Every structure is written in C-alpha cells, then in structure tokens.
Image: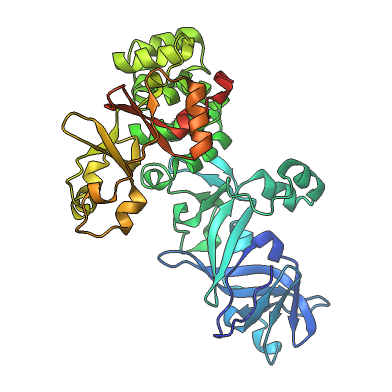
Amino acid sequence: MNTNIGRNGEFVEAVHFLSDIIGIAVVNHDKKVGSTMDVIIKEHENLPEVTDIVVHRSFGYKSLMVPWERVVSVSAKKIVIDIESLEAYEKEPEPSHILLKDYILDKKVIDMEDHEVSVVYDVKLVIRNKRFYVTDVDFSKYALFKRLGLRSIMKFLFGGTPLLKKETLSWSYVQRLPEEIDRFKGNVKLNILKEKLPEINPVDLADMLEELSEEHRLTIFNELDTEQASDTLEEIEPRVQRELLSSIKKERAAELINDMTPAQAADILAVIPANDADELLTLIDKENARKIQYILDKHDECVLNFATSYFIKLPCRMHVSQVLLQYREIAKDKDVIMYMYITDDNDKLEGVVDLHEILKADMAATLGDIMTTNIISLRADNTLLEAAEIFSRYSFRAVPVTDDNDVILGVILYRDIMNLKHRFI
C-alpha cells in the first residue's frame, strides 16, 4: 500500500504491518542506501508514535537513524527518504530507545495476572496526518503464516483476505513499557482483565476467548459482568460454549441463560448434554424456562414462545423531544431498542416508529404524528416458518406479535428466528 503526499501537504492515511516494512529498500534521491532494520517508537498518552527509521547498510557502513520527518513515502516495496548527507544520520540506537521489532515482535503476550495469552507475530501501524502510529498488536495465525512465507497456505486457509481483524488487539490494552527499555525482559503485558474488558465488543471478545487456552479463557470470562458474559457467550462457537458452561458454577450459568431471550438461551442449551440443560432450566425464571423448553422439545413451534416482552412501548401523545431526553432510561434493559411500539391505554398496537425517524423528526412532533400505521405483525399461533418468511420479505429487525384484537403480546427479533432456520426448514 502506497502512502503519498496529498494536495494539502499531508500524508494520505494508510495501514502497514511491521513485518512488511522490515527488510524493504530505503531510497534516498532515487538511490538505494540500505534496508529497514527496525523502527523506533515513543510512547504518548494514547498511541505510540514512530520517531525514527533504523536503516541497515552493507559493506561495513554504519547504520542510519532517519527521523520520521525525513520520510517521503512508504510502500510495499520501499521507503523513500529525503536527506542531504548520509553521514549526518550515521548513529546507533540508544539504550533508552524502544525498538519495535527487537522489543515487541515475537514476544509473549501476558495478561495482568501473568498468564500467557499468545505471541505477538506482527504489529499494525497507521499513517495519519503525516505521523506514524502503532495501533494494534497482531497474534493471529494469519500473521504467523505470513511471517513464515507460507502465502499459499494463507490463501487456502483465509481466502486471500489481506487483513484479519479477529486476532488483533488495540495497543490501548498494552501496559506502558518500562522507561529503562534495555532491561525489558521481553513480555508484552496487557492491561486487559478488569480495567479494559467492559470496553470490548462481545463479538470481538468472543473471538479473543476462542483463541485462548481453556484455563486462561475461564480466567477472563469470570471477570465479566452478567450482561457482557451473557452477550459474549451467545457469540462464542458451540465447542467453547460447552467448555465454559461445564467449567462455571451452575448458578452462574443459569444467571447468564436467564439474561438471554428464550431463542438465544435455547441455542446455547442445545449444545450441552440434556441432563445439564434440564438442571439449568430448574434454576432460571419459570416463564423463561417454559418458553425455552418448548423450543428445545419442538413440541410447539408458535412464534410467541420466541417473543421477548422487553421492548419499548409508548403512547402516541408523547413528544419526540421527550423520547430523546428520556431515551437512555426508556431503552434500559430492553431487548428491542430500534423500534418504538405505539399503543393505547389497553396495549392495542396503533403504530411503529423507527429510532432513525425519531432522530430526524421535528422536536415538537408527537409519536402519533410520525408513526407508521401500516403495521406488519405476527399472530401468536403463527409458525416459525411464517415468521422467517416475514423477515425475509420485509428485512425488518424485529416484528411485533399481536392477538386478534391487535393487543401487543411481545416482539420477535430477527436474529432469534433466522439463526434458528435449520430447526424448522
């Protein structure tokens, strides 16, 4: 990937990996002067910044330390610099300098309790506004195979995907390196347990946990609060779900299951032994357990058993300004937050308002002014197959379930139905 000067004199943003930069040609005034040996970084409050490029030269010439300001461009094949005299930049890195390749690459990644998580196979860097930042450490198998030169295997395993984000970790999770870097023992320590875990998206956290050993996975999983643990458990592959549920206390597992919608819980319980699933069902809310059991047994495939009662229900007279002001409280603990269901005093469904419409509407408007009255809904006795057809046809993210008098009984989520299509098709 090339990095060029834009019209405003700033670098066009570009992404590079350390392994791609090390060993490529360094060119000054159209003449190759050596190859990149390492880069020197300086840690700041947010992200480390590259200060110098260390250039290896052959035939007994001294190495160069070229300040980043003298770099003209970076590409996959070469780094172009602009200096008048090579001799002026002949120097060796000092003991206090942080050499990214020497001190970070191939080092162990350990968590706060000194458990080994993985190995740093690569480092991601980003050029932004004429400055070069370190943004992520990469411990993916993709990076390992690339380093070993096994590109054909990479293509077979990863389909030629140039960047895999699954197993990169933001540098913000890396503890600050010691000031006396020459005494650095070689482990990249992560600030990842209690301090940073709440900030990681459950999908990313699930990917990370799947790569860890069973012991280390359990250590991190036990640090999560109930909501994040439940959301993360939903995203983890079945094999790891089984391992985690068998390793934690039954009461804790029941707490996580109870925090899910019935369909999500059924998906989880379907991958563990029947005896364990039955035991967990005795420990959770009875109404949830009833719905989950229906799904597991397939005795009743009506959509109401998949419906959640945690949705937003509001009167038509409520103003847009009130909704925006109170939205955080209104949406708290709800499974469906993208739609507002407008009902009368008897819970009869009168209309639906999408959150995007709320954000675009006049502050003085009422929900009755902007709601959609042509409502697509399901009846309590509709089947899962009929629900899947509705989702496929209209691309809704959720659909209300009503009775014969249009009273709203619950709401079905797209993911709860479409992720279970294999159960009823």
> For residue 33, which quarter of the picture?
bottom right
Visual colour scheme: rainbow
Of residues 241 and 195, the one nearer the viewer is: 241
The correct choice, above or below, for 200 with respect to 385 in the image is: below
Residue 17 x/y as whole percent: 64, 61
Q: For the point 66% across and 89% down, which residue is it? A: 88
Q: Is residue 225 visible?
A: no
- Horizontally, residue 365 falls left or right of residue 170, namely left
- Horizontally, residue 267 falls left or right of residue 375, namely right
Viewport quadrant of the C terminus: top right
Of residues 409 and 5, the one nearer the viewer is: 409
The correct choice, above or below, for 209 with respect to 303 in the image is: below
Viewport quadrant of the N terminus: bottom right
Residue 199 x/y as whole percent: 39, 47
Residue 279 x/y as whole percent: 39, 9
Q: For the point 40% across and 35% down, which residue is it? A: 376
Of residues 181 and 115, the one nearer the viewer is: 115
Residue 269 x/y as whole percent: 47, 18
Of residues 91 and 313, the one nearer the viewer is: 313
The correct choice, above or below, for 329 with respect to 170 in the image is: above
Q: Is residue 69 visible?
A: yes
The correct choice, above or below, for 311 with respect to 245 in the image is: below
- Horizontally, residue 385 falls left or right of residue 315, namely right
Residue at the bottom extreme? 84
Q: How many marks?
A: 0
Q: For the point 59% across and 81% down, which residue is it? A: 6
